[in-house]
Amino acid sequence: MVSLKDIEPREYQKNIAETASRKNTLVVLPTGMGKTLIALLVAIERLQEFPDSKILVMAPTRPLNAQHKKSFEEFTDLTEDEIVLVTGKIKPEERSELYEKFKVIVATPQTIQNDLENGKISLDNFSLVVFDEAHRCIKDYAYTYVAKKYKERAKHPLILGLTASPGGSFERIGEIKKNLFIEAVEIRTEADQDVEKYVKSVDRDWIYVELPEEMKMVKGILEEMLKDSVYWLREHHFIFTYRPSKKMLLYLQGKVAAKYTQGSKNYSLIWAMIRSAEAIKLEHALELLETQDIFSLHDYLKKLEASNKRTDQRLFKDPRMKEVMKLIETIQKNEIEHPKFEKLKYIVKDLTREDPGVKIIVFANYRATVERITDILRKEGISSEILIGQATKEGKGMTQEKQIEILRRFRDGEFSVLVGTSISEEGLDVPAVDYAIFYESVPSEIRAIQRRGRVGRQTAGKVIFLLTRGTRDEAYYWAAFHKEKKMKGILLDMRRRLKKRNNLKDWIE
């Protein structure tokens, strides 16, 4: 008989697991509050009810899956011979044997989708499927496919979705619920009585910097060029605002490209394709300048300059772009850097001087920025390592084995500062982190919550936001803030409705 060992679940974990053992459940719980233990409790319950069945646990990355495998090994009396981690690196024919042999399968969703499509795995005998980071279960992500096939084929199906941040709209949350066939939603916030006593305090600090005058000149020219494209799109009724977001521009680009592909090749549509492409590229250039550094902007513009694409060539025929390139060369020659680098260096130096055993995570969007930050810190004698995703077309990257090793070394205190891209945001098991530093803000409430969730898991901590005044940094910060506020309102309203419905059901019965 499978059972839990070496850990005592909290009351709210038991209550949530009780619901999740009976119905397809979406669990929304603050990061660090033990969603994994809830999955273990439900898995044990299902294996006790159906002893010959299997359990499938999925998470988006191998490091996350490695943590799930470790949790089953440490906190249940299942043996290592009953739990296996499966990824695309294992040959398909070998994976088929593993699915047959092991009781608990921990895998990436893409691997499971591929093996379902190729008949390498049958979900008939799985009594529980866990979807970690369930906010990804939208559109055509692999989770959606796996959930559908599982629901169709399993003899005793049960679905458990886990997330700290399902999203900031009814539509998104509704899509997740629909795709996972959710029947119950278990929501807890930091303010709930049964959770509050376990939440560690997390302070916030906002540190502002000013863009140097030379960079402001580059910013002004790029904004002028962007305005030309945006105004054309607005005046020709392709957009209905003079201040579109990048998301809006990307949507427009896809829409006009689809119309063009379908055969509508009028003059106005062709110009809309050109103008939207220009606007997206100029928007990205401004984001690099304002939130990253001049070197990232220079590299990006040099790639556009070398491109054979008509829109890129058109941009560089504009005399204003030539002026931008001259200004950038002058800035680099005079070694003028984005002030965030200097500010970050002194923040980290002060923190490590005050406490040599401190653990700090620095989040940055781009690999080049991550590498630059690490170089600066190492020159100051601060032990730092990077955590980035796997190799891309450019060849830079980190194997999943290396990612797991870096996390282990950080956990063991072998270095003080982990500098990472978005892979360091989702669900990583990094206990007792004292500080999280946002090198730049992110407009996504999901990513902002994931970043902050690295702090205050076992001890009190602080989140530090580096913001360039009057730029996208501030705009992105407030965008995420308002989306998160809206998301919490939606979740609380959803919980009130569910409670009201359940009370009415109990009264009728």
Image (cartoon, rainbow, N blue to C red):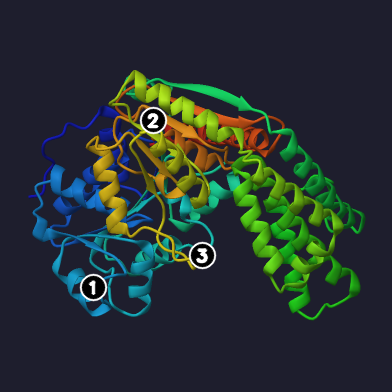
Q: Between disc 3 and disc 1, whose residue precedes?
A: 1
Residue on which disc 2 sits: 455
- Residue 466's image quarter? top right
Residue that mark 1 sits on: 95
Image location (x, y in percent) of residue 70: 19, 49
Marks 3 & 2, CB-CB < 8 Å contact: no
The image shows residue 44, relative to residue 356, as above or below, that is: below
Distance of label 3 from label 1 (alpha carbons):
24 Å
* Amino acid at circle 1: Arg
Disc 3 versus disc 2: distance between alpha carbons?
32 Å
In the rendering, which numbered label is found on residue 366? none
Mark found first going from the N terminus, 2 or 1: 1
Q: Residue at x 79, y 67 (%)?
A: 273
Where residue 351 sits in the image (x, y, percent)?
39, 23
* Residue at x-position 74% and y-position 71%: 257
Image x and y of residue 120, in percent: 28, 77
Give the foreground label among 2 and 1: 2
Residue behind mark 3 = 140
